Amino acid sequence: MSLKPVILVADDELGVRESFEVLLGKDYDLLFATTGREVLEILKNKNVNLILLDIRMPEMDGIEALRQIKELNEDTDVIIVTAVKTLKTAVEAIKLGAYDYITKPFDIHEILSLIKRVTEKQELVKEVMYLRSEIARRFDNIVGRNSKMLEIYDLISRIADNNATVLLTGESGTGKEVLARTIHQQGNRASKPFVAINCAAIPAELLESELFGHEKGAFTGAHQTKIGKFELANGGTVFLDEIGSLRLDLQAKILRALQEREIERVGGTRTIKIDVRVIAASNRDLKKAVEEGALREDLYYRLNVVPIYLPPLRGRRDDIPLLVEHFLNKYNREFNRKVKGFSAGAAAALYHYDWPGNVRELENVIERVVALAHGDTITLKELPLDISIRQNELLDEIQKEGLTLRDARRHFETLYILGIMDKVQWNQTEAAKILGLHRNTLVWKIQQLDLAGKMEERTL
């Protein structure tokens, strides 16, 4: 099976076809057609990378052939190669989706360079599609295609197989533990334990025992020896959440575990060798904690080998529709419901809300509305009050963004009309009455503000 790109030469002149065979036959697989109809028949049966298309051909001219080629597959690349030199024809061809337009007699180097650019672009598109599919496969428990998240995925791919200590920072609810589990699962320790401990959730007097274990009789109530988290995770990964809340004496012991790869149980004298990877996380500003004396500087630098910052949800709003769809599917399965999505107004409210609790808050909202849904579409009034009210409280947002009066008015009209249209289930006549507009004026507004497009984008 040939791996060469396939080029279809469509020209009714034998000399042109022969010229292309001499020029391209070594590096490309060539197919030939003499009419537009032959081109379409070939495309229905064969995969073609590029078409070199003449304008003047019998039965069907090149412009009509181009139109039908794009109807068959809009991604098919077409270069127009013709003796027709009118600007109008060139403009029409480009509008219909031609990659470029070259007139005969053409410069050999120019067309070879152009063909190379097209095939290289196609290889790049394939590579991007492959990488995206790999991301979807390898990071299927993390939802997000925002550029910041893609950078994080790339970083994880580079560090997963080594033992470098990772420090995850970001606001509460951004998914730091999910990311830590992903790093573990992608690495060479995936078959070993992943042990998570929230340093802020355990009373200070018990935390040392939780981390390092204790010997029998070490303190009142220590009736038997206990294995700590570091020993349980041997060979695997320890995830220390809220690392900034640790007491200074425990920070010193964590530092020893990182540097010396050894621990001692509470009440014990025996040194225990450990082999663990440490991933720490905090929603605090750890540099500030160092300045304030709440965190040891040497521990901070030992933890901060590979820093990863998880952005807040409001900083990657383009991921909100993906997250909503993910959680909607999850809770439809869990509650045996069949909620299809959100109305335009509800989707817009979810999109514009600032989500102070980040992904965790969004998941809780979707869980609640799916559990309590009245029908197969969630409307604005079914959302929690703070989110639905936020949809209509626009003044602070508009002032904060520093919009011009014209842009602010357009922004307000967009969201306000979306809200009204949502309430009346996009009945234009009813919405026009509420808005005090003639129905034709409302239709014009919908077109002017691209509300139909926004409805499609945000109906999740």
Image (tube, rainbow, N blue to C red):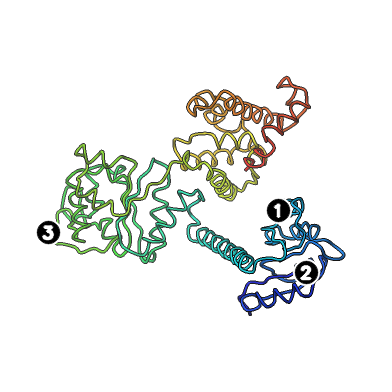
Pick whichever of labels 2 and 3 is earlier in the sequence.
Answer: 2
Say what secondary structure mark 2 lies in.
loop
**Tag 2: Cα neighbours inside 10 Å, few (<14), some, or many (≥20)?**
many
Q: Name the residue under label 2.
A: 11
Q: Residue at x 23, y 63 (%)?
A: 274
Spatial distance from mark 2 to mark 1, Cα to Cα?
19 Å
Q: Nearer the viewer, mark 2 or mark 3?
A: 2
Q: Nearer the viewer, residue 335 or 190?
A: 190
Q: Position of residue 271 (x, y in %)?
A: 15, 62
Horizontal arrangement in the rendering, residue 397 relative to residue 455 (left or right): left
Say what secondary structure mark 3 lies in.
loop
Residue 94: which numbered mark, if any? 1
Spatial distance from mark 2 to mark 3, Cα to Cα?
88 Å
Q: Residue pushed farthest left?
A: 269
Under mark 3, the amino acid is Thr
Horizontal arrangement in the rendering, residue 201 relative to residue 88 (left or right): left
Count of numbered badges drawn on the protein: 3
Q: Residue at x 30, y 42 (%)?
A: 200
Marks 1 and 3 close (CB-CB < 8 Å): no
Q: Nearer the viewer, mark 1 or mark 3?
A: 1
Q: Where is residue 91 in the image (x, y as percent from the top left)?
A: 73, 51
**Tag 3: Cα neighbours inside 10 Å, few (<14), some, or many (≥20)?**
few
| Residue 283 picture quarter | top left
Residue 269: which numbered mark, if any? 3
